Image (cartoon, rainbow, N blue to C red):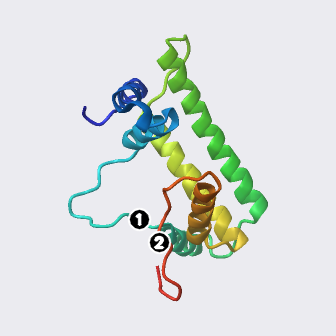
């Protein structure tokens, strides 16, 4: 199957993975894989590595200085900004689900959801910067802690101590 481009295609991919892999794959893993394939753009052929969280955090610090060098939004502002973007993403998801179920009402696109989820990630990074959090090790630690707590075998590699990301 080609990369899904709609919620219905992602749902179809989810169902085919679920029934083709039997007991080897849980329903949640199947759906998460289908969603990852739906929302992850293909990697450009000329690019070997993706954007790291640390790179994104550095870029936001640099852009903030350019954007408004004399003003630094506080954590309250950043938290409200994040909440607003999460709400916008949820609204798009609602409309996609409405379409998947065949219910009446307004529609939206997966492309718009990708845009809103990008906003959520950017706002989360800005919250971390404002709170003085190095987000990349925090994300790795949280992911690995959840895997360990639940007896799962998927872990993220942790950068070697003393090495720059």
Please identify the residue farthest to the left as the structure is shown.
45
Tell me what residue is drawn at x 40 percent, y 25 percent.
15
| Residue 18 x/y as whole percent | 41, 29
Determine the secondary structure under disc 2: helix
| Residue 21 x/y as whole percent | 36, 33
- Circle on res. 51: 1
Please identify the residue farthest to the right as the structure is shown.
76
- Circle on res. 55: 2
Q: Quadrant of residue 126?
A: bottom right
Q: Please state which of residues 87 and 11 is positioned toward the viewer in this rendering.
A: 11
User: From the image, which quarter does the N terminus lie in?
Assistant: top left
Position of residue 161 relative to residue 51, above or below, is: below
Tell me what residue is drawn at x 37 percent, y 31 percent.
17
Q: Quadrant of residue 73?
A: bottom right
- Please state if 108 lies on the left or on the right of 38 as rendered: right
Position of residue 57 relative to residue 13, above or below, is: below
- Circle on res. 68: none
- Please state if 142 lies on the left or on the right of 47 as rendered: right
Judge the density around disc 1: few (<14), some (14-19), many (≥20) Cα neighbours within 10 Å.
few
Q: Please state which of residues 40 and 142 is positioned toward the viewer in this rendering.
A: 142
- Please state if 46 lies on the left or on the right of 114 as rendered: left
Determine the secondary structure under disc 1: loop
Tell me what residue is drawn at x 33 percent, y 67 percent.
49
| Residue 137 x/y as whole percent | 58, 71
Q: Please state which of residues 108 and 19 is positioned toward the viewer in this rendering.
A: 19
């Amino acid at each position: 199957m080609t990369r899904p481009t709609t919620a219905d295609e992602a749902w179809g991919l989810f169902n085919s993975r679920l029934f083709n892999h039997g007991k080897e794959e849980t329903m949640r893993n199947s759906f998460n894989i289908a969603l990852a394939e739906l929302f992850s753009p293909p990697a450009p052929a000329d690019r070997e590595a993706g954007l790291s969280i640390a790179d994104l955090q550095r870029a936001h610090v640099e852009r903030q200085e350019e954007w408004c060098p004399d003003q630094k939004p506080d954590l309250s502002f950043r938290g409200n900004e994040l909440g607003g973007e999460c709400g916008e993403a949820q609204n798009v998801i609602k409309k996609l689900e409405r379409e998947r179920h065949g219910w009446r009402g307004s529609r939206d696109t997966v492309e718009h959801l990708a845009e809103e989820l990008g906003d959520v990630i950017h706002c989360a990074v800005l919250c971390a910067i404002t709170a003085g959090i190095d987000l990349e090790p925090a994300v790795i630690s949280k992911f690995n802690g959840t895997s360990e707590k639940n007896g799962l075998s998927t872990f993220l590699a942790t950068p070697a101590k003393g090495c720059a990301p």
